[in-house]
Image: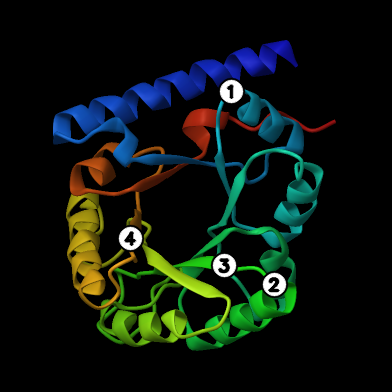
Protein backbone atom coordinates (compact mmCIF):
# COMPACT_ATOMS: atom_id res chain seq x y z
CA UNK A 1 0.00 0.00 0.00
CA UNK A 2 2.89 2.36 0.72
CA UNK A 3 4.27 1.74 -2.78
CA UNK A 4 0.89 2.51 -4.34
CA UNK A 5 0.53 5.65 -2.24
CA UNK A 6 3.97 6.82 -3.37
CA UNK A 7 3.02 6.16 -6.99
CA UNK A 8 -0.26 8.06 -6.74
CA UNK A 9 1.38 10.91 -4.86
CA UNK A 10 4.01 11.32 -7.58
CA UNK A 11 1.42 11.16 -10.36
CA UNK A 12 -0.83 13.60 -8.56
CA UNK A 13 2.04 16.03 -8.06
CA UNK A 14 2.82 15.93 -11.79
CA UNK A 15 -0.81 16.63 -12.69
CA UNK A 16 -1.00 19.45 -10.16
CA UNK A 17 2.11 20.99 -11.72
CA UNK A 18 0.59 20.71 -15.19
CA UNK A 19 -2.56 22.47 -14.02
CA UNK A 20 -0.58 25.16 -12.21
CA UNK A 21 1.62 25.76 -15.26
CA UNK A 22 -1.42 25.91 -17.55
CA UNK A 23 -3.11 28.39 -15.22
CA UNK A 24 0.02 30.56 -15.13
CA UNK A 25 0.28 30.51 -18.92
CA UNK A 26 -3.37 31.55 -19.21
CA UNK A 27 -3.08 34.28 -16.58
CA UNK A 28 -5.43 32.43 -14.25
CA UNK A 29 -5.18 31.69 -10.55
CA UNK A 30 -4.64 28.02 -9.69
CA UNK A 31 -7.76 27.97 -7.52
CA UNK A 32 -9.92 28.77 -10.55
CA UNK A 33 -9.55 25.15 -11.73
CA UNK A 34 -10.83 22.12 -9.80
CA UNK A 35 -9.23 18.73 -10.37
CA UNK A 36 -11.65 15.81 -10.57
CA UNK A 37 -9.90 12.44 -10.47
CA UNK A 38 -11.72 9.85 -12.58
CA UNK A 39 -11.42 6.63 -10.59
CA UNK A 40 -13.30 4.33 -12.96
CA UNK A 41 -12.03 0.70 -12.95
CA UNK A 42 -9.84 1.41 -9.91
CA UNK A 43 -10.59 0.00 -6.44
CA UNK A 44 -11.95 1.76 -3.39
CA UNK A 45 -8.51 1.43 -1.81
CA UNK A 46 -7.15 3.85 -4.42
CA UNK A 47 -9.95 6.29 -3.66
CA UNK A 48 -8.97 6.16 0.01
CA UNK A 49 -5.35 6.88 -0.83
CA UNK A 50 -6.36 9.81 -3.04
CA UNK A 51 -8.45 11.22 -0.20
CA UNK A 52 -5.42 10.94 2.10
CA UNK A 53 -3.43 12.86 -0.50
CA UNK A 54 -5.94 15.69 -0.50
CA UNK A 55 -8.18 14.84 -3.45
CA UNK A 56 -11.76 15.97 -2.80
CA UNK A 57 -13.49 15.41 -6.16
CA UNK A 58 -13.77 11.98 -7.79
CA UNK A 59 -15.72 10.77 -10.80
CA UNK A 60 -17.18 7.53 -12.09
CA UNK A 61 -18.87 6.59 -15.37
CA UNK A 62 -20.52 3.23 -14.63
CA UNK A 63 -23.06 2.85 -11.86
CA UNK A 64 -22.34 -0.85 -11.33
CA UNK A 65 -18.78 0.10 -10.36
CA UNK A 66 -19.54 3.42 -8.73
CA UNK A 67 -22.33 2.45 -6.34
CA UNK A 68 -20.38 -0.10 -4.24
CA UNK A 69 -17.26 2.08 -4.34
CA UNK A 70 -19.15 5.15 -3.12
CA UNK A 71 -20.70 3.07 -0.35
CA UNK A 72 -17.29 1.74 0.71
CA UNK A 73 -15.94 5.30 0.84
CA UNK A 74 -18.98 7.00 2.32
CA UNK A 75 -16.99 8.09 5.38
CA UNK A 76 -14.58 10.16 3.27
CA UNK A 77 -14.95 13.92 2.61
CA UNK A 78 -15.47 13.45 -1.11
CA UNK A 79 -17.66 15.00 -3.77
CA UNK A 80 -18.82 12.40 -6.30
CA UNK A 81 -19.38 13.22 -9.96
CA UNK A 82 -21.13 10.87 -12.37
CA UNK A 83 -19.72 11.50 -15.85
CA UNK A 84 -20.91 8.56 -17.97
CA UNK A 85 -23.91 8.03 -20.15
CA UNK A 86 -26.78 7.45 -17.75
CA UNK A 87 -29.75 5.21 -18.46
CA UNK A 88 -32.96 6.02 -16.64
CA UNK A 89 -33.04 2.58 -14.96
CA UNK A 90 -29.82 3.52 -13.14
CA UNK A 91 -31.02 6.91 -11.95
CA UNK A 92 -32.32 5.72 -8.57
CA UNK A 93 -28.93 4.29 -7.69
CA UNK A 94 -26.88 7.22 -9.02
CA UNK A 95 -29.06 9.77 -7.25
CA UNK A 96 -28.20 8.07 -3.98
CA UNK A 97 -24.48 8.93 -4.04
CA UNK A 98 -23.69 11.40 -6.82
CA UNK A 99 -23.38 15.06 -5.89
CA UNK A 100 -23.15 16.06 -9.56
CA UNK A 101 -24.39 14.39 -12.73
CA UNK A 102 -22.30 15.81 -15.57
CA UNK A 103 -23.96 13.90 -18.40
CA UNK A 104 -27.50 15.30 -18.50
CA UNK A 105 -28.49 15.32 -22.17
CA UNK A 106 -32.21 14.66 -22.57
CA UNK A 107 -35.56 15.56 -21.03
CA UNK A 108 -36.41 12.00 -19.98
CA UNK A 109 -33.28 11.89 -17.85
CA UNK A 110 -34.13 15.24 -16.24
CA UNK A 111 -37.55 13.94 -15.25
CA UNK A 112 -36.10 10.76 -13.74
CA UNK A 113 -33.36 12.60 -11.84
CA UNK A 114 -35.83 15.10 -10.44
CA UNK A 115 -38.14 12.35 -9.22
CA UNK A 116 -35.33 10.57 -7.37
CA UNK A 117 -33.86 13.77 -5.94
CA UNK A 118 -37.23 14.67 -4.46
CA UNK A 119 -37.78 11.13 -3.19
CA UNK A 120 -34.44 11.09 -1.36
CA UNK A 121 -34.53 14.71 -0.23
CA UNK A 122 -31.28 15.51 -2.02
CA UNK A 123 -30.31 18.29 -4.40
CA UNK A 124 -28.35 17.11 -7.43
CA UNK A 125 -26.02 19.39 -9.31
CA UNK A 126 -26.49 18.95 -13.05
CA UNK A 127 -24.24 19.77 -15.98
CA UNK A 128 -25.52 19.53 -19.52
CA UNK A 129 -23.25 17.36 -21.66
CA UNK A 130 -22.73 19.19 -24.94
CA UNK A 131 -22.04 17.19 -28.10
CA UNK A 132 -19.76 19.25 -30.31
CA UNK A 133 -19.75 16.50 -32.93
CA UNK A 134 -23.50 16.88 -33.45
CA UNK A 135 -25.48 19.20 -35.65
CA UNK A 136 -27.58 21.90 -34.07
CA UNK A 137 -30.39 19.47 -33.20
CA UNK A 138 -28.81 15.99 -33.26
CA UNK A 139 -27.02 13.90 -30.62
CA UNK A 140 -23.34 13.12 -30.44
CA UNK A 141 -21.75 9.71 -30.91
CA UNK A 142 -21.00 9.52 -27.18
CA UNK A 143 -24.19 11.19 -26.05
CA UNK A 144 -24.74 14.83 -25.31
CA UNK A 145 -27.16 17.50 -26.40
CA UNK A 146 -26.42 19.51 -29.52
CA UNK A 147 -25.61 23.19 -29.01
CA UNK A 148 -29.01 24.15 -30.37
CA UNK A 149 -30.76 22.18 -27.63
CA UNK A 150 -28.95 23.68 -24.65
CA UNK A 151 -31.43 26.44 -23.90
CA UNK A 152 -34.52 24.26 -23.75
CA UNK A 153 -32.82 21.55 -21.69
CA UNK A 154 -31.31 24.12 -19.33
CA UNK A 155 -34.71 25.63 -18.65
CA UNK A 156 -36.07 22.17 -17.93
CA UNK A 157 -33.32 21.38 -15.41
CA UNK A 158 -33.58 24.80 -13.77
CA UNK A 159 -37.30 24.31 -13.23
CA UNK A 160 -37.11 20.70 -12.02
CA UNK A 161 -37.55 20.09 -8.27
CA UNK A 162 -34.45 18.71 -6.58
CA UNK A 163 -32.10 19.66 -9.42
CA UNK A 164 -29.65 22.53 -9.71
CA UNK A 165 -28.32 23.71 -13.07
CA UNK A 166 -24.58 24.19 -12.57
CA UNK A 167 -23.12 24.45 -16.08
CA UNK A 168 -21.83 22.56 -19.10
CA UNK A 169 -19.58 19.59 -19.82
CA UNK A 170 -18.02 18.25 -22.98
CA UNK A 171 -15.60 15.62 -24.23
CA UNK A 172 -13.29 16.60 -27.07
CA UNK A 173 -14.99 15.04 -30.12
CA UNK A 174 -13.36 12.41 -32.29
CA UNK A 175 -15.35 13.33 -35.40
CA UNK A 176 -16.76 16.45 -37.00
CA UNK A 177 -15.28 19.91 -37.33
CA UNK A 178 -13.59 19.84 -33.92
CA UNK A 179 -11.87 16.46 -34.30
CA UNK A 180 -8.22 16.92 -33.34
CA UNK A 181 -8.88 20.57 -32.42
CA UNK A 182 -9.29 20.31 -28.67
CA UNK A 183 -8.53 23.96 -27.92
CA UNK A 184 -11.10 25.11 -30.46
CA UNK A 185 -13.67 22.69 -29.06
CA UNK A 186 -13.17 23.94 -25.53
CA UNK A 187 -13.30 27.56 -26.68
CA UNK A 188 -16.62 26.79 -28.35
CA UNK A 189 -17.88 25.35 -25.07
CA UNK A 190 -16.89 28.58 -23.30
CA UNK A 191 -18.94 30.60 -25.80
CA UNK A 192 -21.91 28.34 -25.12
CA UNK A 193 -21.34 28.76 -21.38
CA UNK A 194 -21.38 32.53 -21.73
CA UNK A 195 -24.66 32.29 -23.63
CA UNK A 196 -26.13 30.01 -20.98
CA UNK A 197 -25.17 32.34 -18.13
CA UNK A 198 -27.15 35.16 -19.69
CA UNK A 199 -30.34 33.35 -18.65
CA UNK A 200 -28.97 31.13 -15.85
CA UNK A 201 -26.41 33.25 -14.03
CA UNK A 202 -25.33 30.59 -11.52
CA UNK A 203 -24.54 27.94 -14.16
CA UNK A 204 -20.83 28.75 -13.99
CA UNK A 205 -19.19 25.30 -14.11
CA UNK A 206 -17.37 24.35 -17.30
CA UNK A 207 -16.09 20.77 -17.20
CA UNK A 208 -13.64 19.99 -20.00
CA UNK A 209 -10.26 18.43 -20.51
CA UNK A 210 -8.82 15.08 -19.53
CA UNK A 211 -5.33 13.60 -19.11
CA UNK A 212 -4.19 14.33 -22.66
CA UNK A 213 -5.70 17.78 -23.16
CA UNK A 214 -6.13 19.44 -19.78
CA UNK A 215 -3.80 22.31 -20.77
CA UNK A 216 -6.01 23.23 -23.71
CA UNK A 217 -9.09 23.16 -21.48
CA UNK A 218 -7.47 25.41 -18.86
CA UNK A 219 -6.33 27.82 -21.58
CA UNK A 220 -9.89 28.00 -22.90
CA UNK A 221 -11.31 28.75 -19.46
CA UNK A 222 -12.52 25.42 -18.02
CA UNK A 223 -13.34 25.48 -14.31
CA UNK A 224 -13.05 21.69 -13.86
CA UNK A 225 -10.78 19.11 -15.49
CA UNK A 226 -11.42 15.35 -15.33
CA UNK A 227 -8.18 13.38 -15.09
CA UNK A 228 -7.89 9.60 -14.83
CA UNK A 229 -4.87 7.80 -16.25
CA UNK A 230 -2.40 10.62 -15.58
CA UNK A 231 -3.11 10.19 -11.86
CA UNK A 232 -3.94 6.51 -11.54
CA UNK A 233 -1.66 5.12 -14.23
CA UNK A 234 -2.06 1.72 -15.84
CA UNK A 235 -4.56 -0.38 -13.95
CA UNK A 236 -2.81 -3.04 -11.83
CA UNK A 237 -3.64 -6.64 -12.65
CA UNK A 238 -6.37 -8.19 -10.60
CA UNK A 239 -5.76 -11.32 -8.59
61 sits to left or right of 43: left
Percent across and percent down for residue 47 are 67, 35
- Residue furthest to the front: 121
Residue named by callout 4:
173
Residue that numbered label 2 is attached to: 121
Q: Residues within 10 Å of mark 2 (few under 14, many from 20)?
A: few
Q: Which residue is mark 3?
A: 124
Mark 1 Cα shell of 10 Å, populated few (<14), some (14-19), many (≥20): some
Decide: is 134 above or below 226.
Answer: below
Alpha-carbon distance for marks 3 and 4?
26 Å
Give the distance between the C-alpha atoms of the residues marked 4 and 2, in whole angstroms.
36 Å
Distance (Cα) linking label 4 and label 1: 32 Å
**Residue 197 at x, y percent in the picture:** 24, 70
Helix, strand or loop for disc 1: loop
Q: Which of the two residues, 196 or 230, is positioned nearer the viewer here? A: 196
The answer to which image quadrant residue 156 occupies is: bottom left
Disc 4 secondary structure class: loop
Image depth: mark 1 or mark 2 in front? 2
Left or right for 97, reference 25: right
Cα separation, mark 3 vs mark 2, equals: 10 Å
Q: Earlier in the sequence, mark 1 or mark 3?
A: 1
Amino acid sequence: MTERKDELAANLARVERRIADACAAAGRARDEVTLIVVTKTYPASDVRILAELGVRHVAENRDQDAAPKAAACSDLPLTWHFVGQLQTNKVRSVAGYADFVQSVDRSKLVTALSKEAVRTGRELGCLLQVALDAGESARGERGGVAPGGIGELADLVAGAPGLRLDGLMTVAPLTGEYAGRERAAFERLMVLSTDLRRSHRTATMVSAGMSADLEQAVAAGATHVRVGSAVLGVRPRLG
